[in-house]
Image: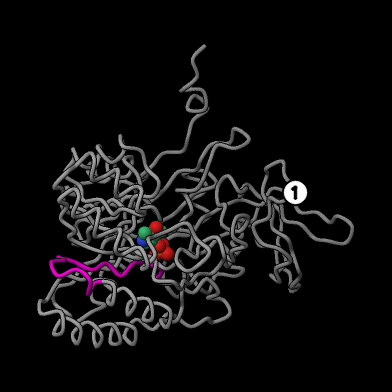
Amino acid sequence: MIKIYSDVTTDYNIFEGKDPIELVEKYGSPLYVYNERIFRDKCREMKSLLKYPNFSVSYSAKANSNLTLLSIAQEEGLNVDAMSPGEIYVQQKAGFKPEQIFYISNNVSAEEMKYAIDNDVLISIDSISQLELFGSINRGGRVAVRFNPGHGAGHNAKVVTAGKNTKFGVEAKYLPQVKEIIKKYDLNLVGINQHIGSLFLEGTAYIESLKSLLSIAENFKDLEFIDMGGGFGIPYHKQEGQERLDLKKLGKEIDTIIFEWVKKYGREIHFKIEPGRYIPAECSVLLGTVHAVKENYGRKYAGTDLGFNVLIRPVMYDSHHDVEIYRKVDLKSDIKENVTIVGNICETGDILAYERLLPQIFEGDVLGILDAGAYGYVMSSNYNNRLRPAELLIKEDGTEKIIRRRDTLEDLIRNYEL
Ligand SMILES: *Cc1c(COP(=O)(O)O)cnc(C)c1O
């Protein structure tokens, strides 16, 4: 391989010395590659966020729910958040015990609630009407309520999940109704939770919302836990040297607040965080192949197999992913140029990177899309009847393992009834 532009993967040794072009030759393109060492590091970073002893991390598994990665998170001592009965099912298959799973529900049916109840999984309820439903089917049960502290955070309006413009959580002004329903159905409110949004790189909003959540907590004397939510951001602009979220500083600030608060509350209750993205995002590079290079009315395009069926974040949230370039043949160019990297889906919006200044790209180059481990494969689809890619794990001992095979053509017609 000739490294045309590969500083980040070299610095982090993401491929553990392996040649990404050989990986594509061996396992096909496109290919999600994960590094086990980095994944485990991120689990450990989150676990050491606080000095407060009664603290745990629930991995918000919707960010990446590959069975093998879930098992590794479980081995690392993380608990897990589920967003659906399907997630509960998969998480149990990965080895999580019911008491390690927290189902954060949102607008669900009685059947879905029953699925969690029958599996002894604790549910967080998201509205007054759903609390009423829960009470009516599980009188006397244990339950958590998700509050909306009134301010949110996030990299895009679509992922701000608290504040005045979102469907999530119960407003503090409905506290009397919450208490009333709890009393009516003899429910045991064991925890309260919040999640203000995704991808913050500085902690002010998180700290502010924690304070609001704590003031809500003071309304309930018998809580077992307070769940502060996720949203911890990662630097997607590594090639420009973007700063990381300062976890030491944030951890210290949170510690100060909760050590102080539990004195007032009178009990060292349990605190949780629920990071999604932070755990898997940076351990993964999505590899794809350039099949065409062309110019259309003055704009340069690199046409790849990385359509939005494979990675939808740029199309859905205008997200940025750094791009690296690897080349098999000894073809040199000193040119840097603006290039628009597109996929193979029949839609004009199928753009992975718009007018990106990069070293000249040639047909046959392999591209590495960085930080692809969160909201990558899980949001992929078979749109255009394309096959979802394989997922490859580079293990700590350096061996490679396919942890999810590529779709086959037969997979495309598996569920049809003729
Ligand atoms: C998605 C989600 C998370 C994780 O968000 P990240 O930004 O990926 O950390 C945490 N909690 C809830 C309730 C979520 O819906």
Image point (34%, 83%), residue name: 250
Magenta stretch in the rendered image: 217-231
Image point (19%, 58%), residue name: 189
Give the percent coordinates (x, y) of residue 392.
Answer: 40, 49
Q: Is residue 158 visible?
A: yes
Q: Is residue 67 left or right of residue 284?
A: left
Q: Quadrant of ligand 1?
A: bottom left
**Closer-to-camera residue (225/394):** 225
Q: Is residue 230 magenta?
A: yes
Give the percent coordinates (x, y) of residue 405.
Answer: 41, 39
**Closer-to-camera residue (219/305):** 219
Give the percent coordinates (x, y) of residue 82.
Answer: 31, 50
In the rendered image, which quarter is residue 205 located in? bottom left
Q: Amino acid at mark 1?
A: Thr
Q: Is residue 293 left or right of residue 90?
A: right
Q: Is residue 179 magenta?
A: no
Q: Is residue 314 above or below residue 251?
A: above
| SS at badge 1 | loop
In the rendered image, which quarter is residue 61 located in? bottom left
Q: Residues within 10 Å of mark 1 (few under 14, many from 20)?
A: few
Q: Which residue is mark 1?
A: 348
Image point (51%, 43%), residue name: 28
Image point (68%, 55%), residue name: 351
Magenta stretch secondary structure, dominant:
loop
- Which residue lies most toward the right here? 297
Image quadrant containing the N terminus: bottom right
Q: Is residue 16 visible?
A: no
